[in-house]
Image (spheres, helix red, strand yellow):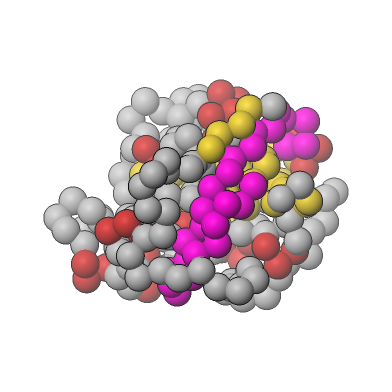
Amino acid sequence: MARVSEAMGDEPRLPPGQYIPRGRPIIHYGRVPEFKPDRWDFRIFGATASGQEHRFTWADIERLPRTTVIADFHCVTRFSIMGNEWRGVSPATLMELAPPDPGVRHVMIWAEYGYSANLRMSDFTAPGTLFATDLDDKPLSPERGYPLRIVVPHLYAWKSVKWVRGVEYMLEDRRGFWEERGYHNVADPWREQRYSYQEEPGEGPP
């Protein structure tokens, strides 16, 4: 089992404008979906190397090797939860099974109810990014994204989509759910990239 730490040494760990709350707040859009393992699947589609869609059952996901990531978690609503231990499947593992076309530069993460968030490929493949199944040695609770969520700890947490059901490989960037509603396309908490009006040229699609 691989293990990755996102600790930042002697550098500050709390991005500007953030605070550490009591407990672990839970925020999500819409209702919590019911997990039905016999009907659940995970799909990788779009600009795949083969041109074909790849489908994984929950049993397939459970058989994949696991990685542990210790990382902080920064919500755009300004709270940060420090030192979370996530366990799950690395994007690199899935990309080996379902390679992207060489021209892919972005991905869209798709979840239940059509929710989505776009990522640059460099963020998707960053060392701390993980498709998490566990948090602090326990399976994710339904409210925190059970059975599977993506965790992108170096970006604001709306990019860490809960209840993930698929990845779309994209040759061109396209905004996801909150990005279409005025949130920043990149979402770097260290640069306080909260809203689309802050975007510099090249940070978002036309």
**Does 77 appear above or below 12?**
below
Residue 96: x and y in percent read 56, 23
The image shows residue 22 at horizontal and vertical percentages of: 61, 74
The segment highlighted magenta reads 61-85
Vertical position of residue 193 compared to residue 6: above or below: below
Asked if residue 124 shows in the view, the reply is no
Q: Quadrant of residue 146?
A: bottom right
Q: Residue 165, image x and y in percent?
A: 63, 51
Q: Is residue 110 above or below residue 2?
A: below
Residue at 48% x, 43% y is 7
Residue 29, image quadrant: bottom right
| Residue projecting furthest to the front | 10
Using the image as rendered, state which of residue 184 and residue 47 is in the foreground: 184
Q: Residue at x 42, y 41 (%)?
A: 9
Q: Which quarter of the picture shows residue 15?
A: bottom left
Q: Check residue 22 for magenta coloring.
A: no
Q: Is residue 59 left or right of residue 201?
A: right
Q: How many marks?
A: 0
Residue that protrudes farthest toward the right in the picture: 38
